[in-house]
Image (cartoon, helix red, strand yellow):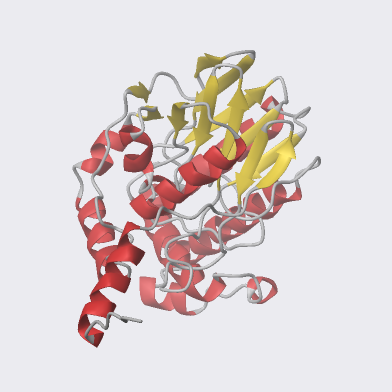
Amino acid sequence: MFTMRFPLYLVMLLYVGAAAAAPPQPLPATRIAPNTYVLYGHIAEVDTHNRGFNGNAGFVVTDDGVVAIDALGTPLLGQRMLATIRQVTGKPVKYLILTHNHPDHSYGAVAFKDAGARLVAHAGTRDYINSSNLEGSVAFRNEIIPEDMQGFRAVPPDEAIAGPLFGKQVFTAGKHRFEVYNVNHHHSFGDLVIRQLPENIVWIGDLAFNGRTTFMGDGHSAATLAGIDWLRKTFPDAKLMVPGHGQAQEPPFPMLERTYSYVQRLRDKMRKAVEAGMTLEEAVGQCDFPDWQKVRLYEENHKKNCNFVYQEMEQEIVFGKQ
């Protein structure tokens, strides 16, 4: 019997080529309501283990196609999310709605755009696309997970949400209604909240966090408090709220109060520090919340939040700016 033998280097090339050509693998998805699914990301910073899968996303299967909410953190993850959707339904994705522009929620958008979805995002997304923030974030991910970032490009919205604060635009798909609310820029260059009807599920993006310390460096603390107040008053009858990080919650949505109290506490502490004449370094150095120290990403985010809010309070007190 004749046996064909290949040199080892050629075998390795064939192996690598086959791996590169392998279709994207689906991600785990949790069904939270009829035809409604969440992909829960790791609560961690991006690294080579989670490959940028460190934020939540979801999708709703309607009579008229799929509506996806957020796109995860790399083009490859966007492709894997599409593969997950195709395990559930063969219907096309009609809309991709981004809650905000941060990488862990939006860098997979190119996969959806290439698949024919219309992108709905805050008008501030255009500002982000033209900012140094985008350049820095892309460079950081290209350094850590370059293979996963292949094919990345920034995708401007087809439908840009602006208008009055807490105003809404409505998108329909089959019997489903998606109310998309402009909640300003409490966390990023522009943030949205989506109410999904008839299920009465509210997708809140990063307005509140479940089991994770928030990051405030691109937002406004006063706007965060106003947004949470609005959320509580506007959707008291919601069946579920889905955050951008952590598990979905049922009423009374304790993550709202937990996030609100954290941000208010930061503002109070940094306001007192500014009024006492403390320097930024002194204020941040004594800004510790012992009861938060075991919450994930406290070490990574808390001091940065103190720094950011000190500067906000300085602007408010010294210059009278909100």
Residue 19 sits above or below residue 97 on the image: below
Tell me if 151 is positioned left or right of 207 in this view: left
Q: Residue at x 48, y 55 (%)?
A: 25
- Residue 234 in which image quadrant: top right
Tell me if 37 is positioned left or right of 81 in this view: right
- Residue 278 in which image quadrant: bottom left
Residue 99 sits above or below residue 206 on the image: above
Front-lying residue, 11 or 293: 11
Tell me if 72 is positioned left or right of 89 in this view: left
Residue 221 sits above or below residue 271 on the image: above
Q: Residue at x 24, y 50 (%)?
A: 151
Front-lying residue, 279 or 195: 195
Image coordinates of residue 204 in percent, x first then y, are: 58, 39
Q: Residue at x 70, y 51 (%)?
A: 255
Q: Residue furthest front?
A: 1
Image coordinates of residue 42 in percent, x first then y, are: 56, 63
> How many numbered marks appear?
0
Tell me if 44 is positioned left or right of 199 in this view: left
Question: From where the camera sits, is residue 228 visible?
Answer: yes
Say which quadrant the N terminus sits in: bottom left
Image coordinates of residue 62 in percent, x first then y, are: 61, 22
Front-lying residue, 180 or 298: 180
Q: Residue at x 63, y 53 (%)?
A: 259
Image coordinates of residue 258 in percent, x first then y, are: 69, 54
Front-lying residue, 215 or 33: 33
Question: From where the camera sits, is residue 222 visible?
Answer: no
Say which quadrant the C terminus sits in: top left
